[in-house]
Each structure stands twice: as structure tokens, then as C-alpha cells.
Amino acid sequence: MSGHGSHAPYAGASHPPTPGQPWPPSGYPPLYPHGYHGMPPAGAGRLDVPRPPSITGAVQLMWAGAALSLIGWFVSLATLGRVRGQLSAQAPLLPSSRQLTPEQIDLVVDLAVWIGAASGLVTVLLWVWMAAVNRKGRGWARVLATLFGCCYLLSVLSGLLLGRATGGADLVLPLATAVVGLFALVLLWRRESSDYIRSARWRR
């Protein structure tokens, strides 16, 4: 027994040694030669995986979507004045019990302005946020971008089917934004994008 004392197993044999500390001359191999649960070995350093063109293209398309959403936001604010004119023109046609007073028309227009401004800004910020986090290869960001894209596409399609598109800008900008988002999602789900996202955990 004493003969084995000088070759006793390393005190921390159940765990790899700290970086820079050699393995003991016990003849025992490293417990996790390839890392624990697929992790790089201790001291392996940061993994630098190049960003694939599919991720770069998806991010660029997201920035384009943010720009289109911003343009659409300005267009919608500029055309909200039509709401006041339409309400004023339709007011005499309504039954007396449902006619809107000038004060009520102003309230409706003001609410439309505030709601339109808030929703437009939120949409632009979501595009920018998705571009930033997907550029880093976050898996949850890809899933969230897919959810946002599907919801936006459904809203555009439902708006078209219900006849809500009343002008050229109302029709072109939402469709263009939806197409941009669709192409961005296609790039995000390419195989090289998935490989990059899987490797992102070692780059944190």
C-alpha cells in the first residue's frame, strides 16, 4: 500500500486541474479529455467562429426592415389627417344618435395619432433589437424573430383580405416589409446559420 503512496491519484481527480496545472504522474488520463458535456477543455480559450454570410445577410435585411418600418411610420402619421376629413364627411350620414361631435372627432384623431406613433416606434425598435441579437448568434433570438415575422405576415395578409389597404403606400410598404422579413428568416434557418448559432454558446 505504501508503495502506491507516491503515485496516489490526483486529489482533484474527479475534476480537471486548473489551467496551467499539469496532470500528476499517476498514469491516470484526464477525466474529460474533450471537455465536460462537450465543453472545450479548461484553458482552451475562446472559440472564434467566423460569422457566415447567411447571418450577415439576415442582419442586413433586418436593418432594411427597420428602415421600411420607419418610412411606413412617417407615412402613416402624414396620412392620419385623412381620418379627420373622413369622419367629418361621414358624420352627417350617421343617425342622429350616432353622430360625432367635433370634439369627439378630435379625440378619435388624437388617439389614432398616439397609437400609430407608439406602435410604429415599437416595430422599428423590434427590428433593430432582432438585428443586434441575431448578429450574435442567439438561438432564442432566431425563434423570437420567427414568431414576430409570422405575426407580422399574418397581420399584413389579414389587412389585405379585409380591404384595409386604401392606398399605394398602404399596400406597398407592408408587403415589402413582410417580404424582407421572410427572406431574413430563410437566411436565419440555413444550415450554416444553425451551425453558427450552436457554436455561439462557447463565444460568450
Image (cartoon, rainbow, N blue to C red):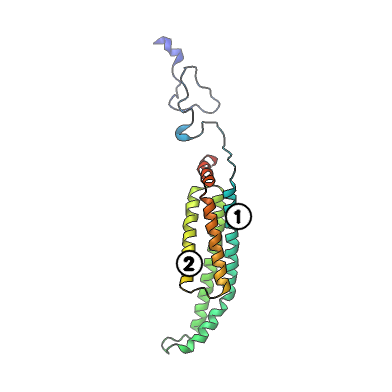
Residue drawn at (56%, 26%) of the image: 20
Foreground residue, 106 or 174?
A: 174
Residue drawn at (57%, 34%) of the image: 45
Question: Which quadrant of the rendered structure holds the C terminus?
Answer: top right
Question: Which quadrant of the rendered structure holds the N terminus?
Answer: top left
Disc 1 from disc 2: Cα separation: 24 Å
Locate residue 127, reporting x and y percent.
55, 58
User: Does residue 42 appear left or right of residue 67 in this picture?
Assistant: left
Tell me the residue that label 2 is attached to. Answer: 157
Tell me the residue that label 1 is attached to. Answer: 60
In this view, 144 is above or below 172: above
Q: Residues within 10 Å of mark 1 (few under 14, many from 20)?
A: some
Foreground residue, 103 or 151?
A: 151
Locate residue 85, reporting x and y percent.
55, 83
Q: Amino acid at mark 1?
A: Gln
Q: Amino acid at mark 2?
A: Leu
Foreground residue, 85 or 188?
A: 188
